[in-house]
Amino acid sequence: QVHLLESGGNLVQAGGSLTLSCAASGSRFNIMGWYRQAPGKQRELVATTSSGSISGGSAIYADSVKGRFTISRDNAKNTVSLQMNSLKSEDTAVYYCYVTTALYAVGYWGQGTQVTVSS
């Protein structure tokens, strides 16, 4: 059974930094990444990596976070992290870890962690 454990959400001032972490267990994973959902908006992709990227080198980023956020993963530990710098109020959202299993590409969501950026 797949389990995802997220951590790192917090209240931070605009311009500050936060690091989110997600530890996955119960399978081998291909896609590991982060989505977010702000109040009244649809869930959107933030950043993802595939299993071939050891340090997030082939990561995909939303245009709104390019240059500010960095995704990284540890394949041996099944963890994925999101370093968020220069945070803006519009980054306020619940951030969700998302993974897909290497076998059959089944997707799983974490429970979400709140990031609030005060202006």
Image: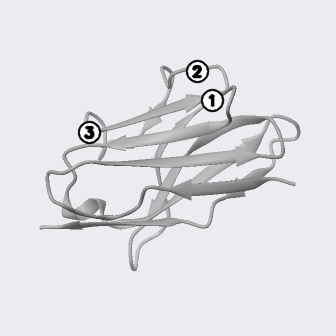
58 relative to 117, above or below: above
Q: How many marks?
A: 3
Q: Position of residue 29 (x, y in %)?
A: 74, 36
- The quadrant in which the N terminus is found is bottom right
41 relative to 86, above or below: below
Mark 1 residue element = loop
Q: Position of residue 93 (x, y in %)?
A: 38, 67
| Left or right position of 116 against 14 | right
Which residue sits at x=69%, y=26%?
Answer: 76
Point out the tag, 3 or 2, that comes first from the N-terminus. 2
- Name the foreground residue: 116 vs 43: 116
- Name the foreground residue: 29 vs 38: 29
> Are there few (<14), some (14-19), or many (20+) residues within 10 Å of tag 3?
few
- Quarter holding residue 14: bottom left
Which residue sits at x=40%, y=79%?
Answer: 40
Q: Tag on residue 68?
A: 3
Which residue sits at x=81%, y=53%?
Answer: 2
- Quarter holding residue 91: bottom left
Q: Tag on residue 50?
A: 1
Mark 2 residue element = loop
> Are there few (<14), some (14-19), or many (20+) residues within 10 Å of tag 2?
some
> Are there few (<14), some (14-19), or many (20+) residues within 10 Å of tag 1?
many
- Disc 3 marks a residue whose amino acid type is Arg
Q: Are marks 2 and 1 in contact (CB under 8 Å)?
A: yes
- Name the foreground residue: 6 vs 71: 6
How far apart are the two marked residues, 3 and 1, measured between alpha carbons? Answer: 20 Å
Q: Tag on residue 53?
A: 2
- Disc 2 marks a residue whose amino acid type is Ser
How far apart are the two marked residues, 3 and 2, measured between alpha carbons? Answer: 19 Å
Point out the tag, 3 or 1, that comes first from the N-terminus. 1
